Image (cartoon, rainbow, N blue to C red):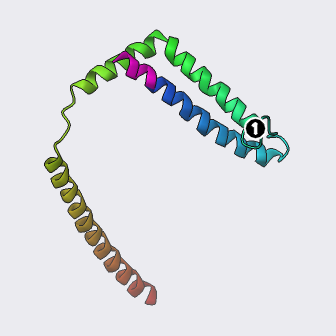
Amino acid sequence: MEKYVRLSFVVGGLLVWIMLAAFLGAVMSWISPNLDKPLMGAQFAVSNLLGLMAGIGFVLFMWFSPQVQKFGMEVAGELRNVTWPTWPETRVSTIVVVITTVVVSLILGLFDAVIGALTSVIYRL
């Protein structure tokens, strides 16, 4: 179970790297197009390096924080207690959700049409 918790920390670090590199690249190009200089080819620039360093820092913080470790182990333990629905239960639940969505959409569309008709009558007066 601990290996899955640690793997989730690494996946989280990769997500931090990808998202922060994209954000920093956009901010740097908005501030000055020459600010985000390529370091190793056109695909790895300053924004990627900063995002990578932040991702590594995230992983190291998560990896060595006892509070985060404890919380991650508790979450993994609780996930073992989850009972996942069977395929027939999932199919029936999906059908119920789709039908409910269609019915609510029709009701809201009817309300919109009635209110639109009433407001057009009021504006003509």
Magenta run includes residue 6: yes
Quadrant the C terminus occupies: bottom left
Residue at x 49%, y 12% (from the top left corner): 65
Question: Callout 1, which amino acid?
Answer: Ala
Foreground of the two, 64 or 114: 64
Foreground of the two, 66 or 13: 13
Magenta run includes residue 48: no
Residue at x 56%, y 16% (from the top left corner): 60
Q: In the current view of this chain or complex, which residue is farthest to the front?
A: 41
Task: Pinpoint residue 40: horizontal percent, then vertical percent.
Answer: 77, 35
Task: Pinpoint residue 39: horizontal percent, then vertical percent.
Answer: 79, 35
User: Can you say whether 36 is above or below 125 in the image?
Assistant: above
Residue matched to label 1: 45
Quadrant the N terminus occupies: top left
What is the magenta range? Answer: 1-7
Describe residue 21's horizontal placement relative to residue 90 as left or right. Answer: right
Task: Pinpoint residue 73: horizontal percent, then vertical percent.
Answer: 35, 17
Residue at x 71%, y 31% (from the top left corner): 49
Residue 116 lies in what quarter of the image? Answer: bottom left
